Amino acid sequence: MGYMRLFLLVCVGFFVPSHLIYGDLDVRKTIIKTLDATKSREFSGAQLYNQTYTYYLKISDFYYSLIEIPTSTYLSPGISTTISSTYLAGRAPIYDQNNNKVGVCTASFLCIRNEDQSIYTDISNFISVDNGLIVTWFTPTTLANLDVDTIINSMVTECIVTATTKVGVNPFYGQTFDLVVSSENGNIYFQFTRTGTIF
């Protein structure tokens, strides 16, 4: 029985590669190189997601697309606290920093003037970019007047948004951005900066 065990032990030594028993330096080096390459790719991905993406729309494009949705007070004028209301919506292409058309922006503006003469506006915004970024957000604000230029420029804001809509392949799905919306030289600018945990 003792000779049989010794014979089996010797046979195992022929069939099992030595680097599995003792560890092979080349194998360890290969594993380390693979891990380093993976970390490098992950770091490159992190850099990509940390980039700032800037788009803009031309206010004139948005203006010429506007539609007006009829509104009326639910209660009679003598009872309702709403004096007047306006509901506008528009759609315009957005461009990147190289002036290439890369997507579309839509927005709707529900404006209500109350008895104290303040004009409250509820803005619903939507942006869809060809690279897969799809974002929606809401902007409540108070307007000085109901001029169309004032209404469109009321999109200006700063907020945190999350890409929560997934249509097809969307590399930004679930990602969070600091969004700054500004107005300059007849354009509305949308600047997205990646924030939060990268995954």
Image (tube, rainbow, N blue to C red):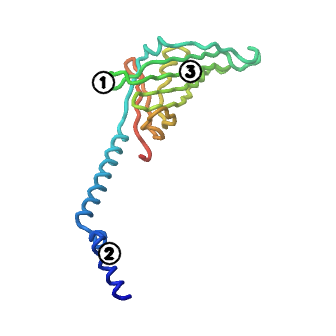
Amino acid carrying label 1: it is: Asn
**Mark drawn on residue 176:** none
Crowd class of label 3 (few under 14; some 14 to 19; many from 20; radius 10 Å):
many
Amino acid carrying label 3: it is: Phe
Q: Secondary structure at mark 1?
A: loop
The correct choice, above or below, for 22 with respect to 192 in the image is below
Residue located beneath label 1 in the image: 98
**Mark drawn on residue 109:** 3
Residue 111: where, in percent of width, then height?
Answer: 60, 20
Q: Does residue 161 appear in the picture of this structure? A: no
Extreme top residue here? 64
Residue 33: where, in percent of width, then height?
Answer: 26, 56
Q: Earlier in the sequence, mark 2 or mark 3?
A: 2
Instruction: Identify the residue shown where x is 30% and y is 24%.
Output: 98
Instruction: Identify the residue shown where x is 37% and y is 18%.
Output: 185
Extreme left residue here? 26
Q: Secondary structure at mark 3?
A: strand
Q: Are marks 2 and 3 in contact (CB under 8 Å)?
A: no
Taking depth in this image into account, of 110 and 165 the one nearest to the observer is 165
Q: Secondary structure at mark 2?
A: helix
Residue located beneath label 2 in the image: 12
Q: Earlier in the sequence, mark 1 or mark 3?
A: 1
Residue 71: where, in percent of width, then height?
Answer: 65, 15
Q: Nearer the viewer, mark 2 or mark 3?
A: 2
Amino acid carrying label 2: it is: Val
The correct choice, above or below, for 135 with respect to 117 in the image is below
Quadrant location of residue 115?
Answer: top right
Instruction: Identify the residue shown where x is 46% and y is 16%.
Output: 62
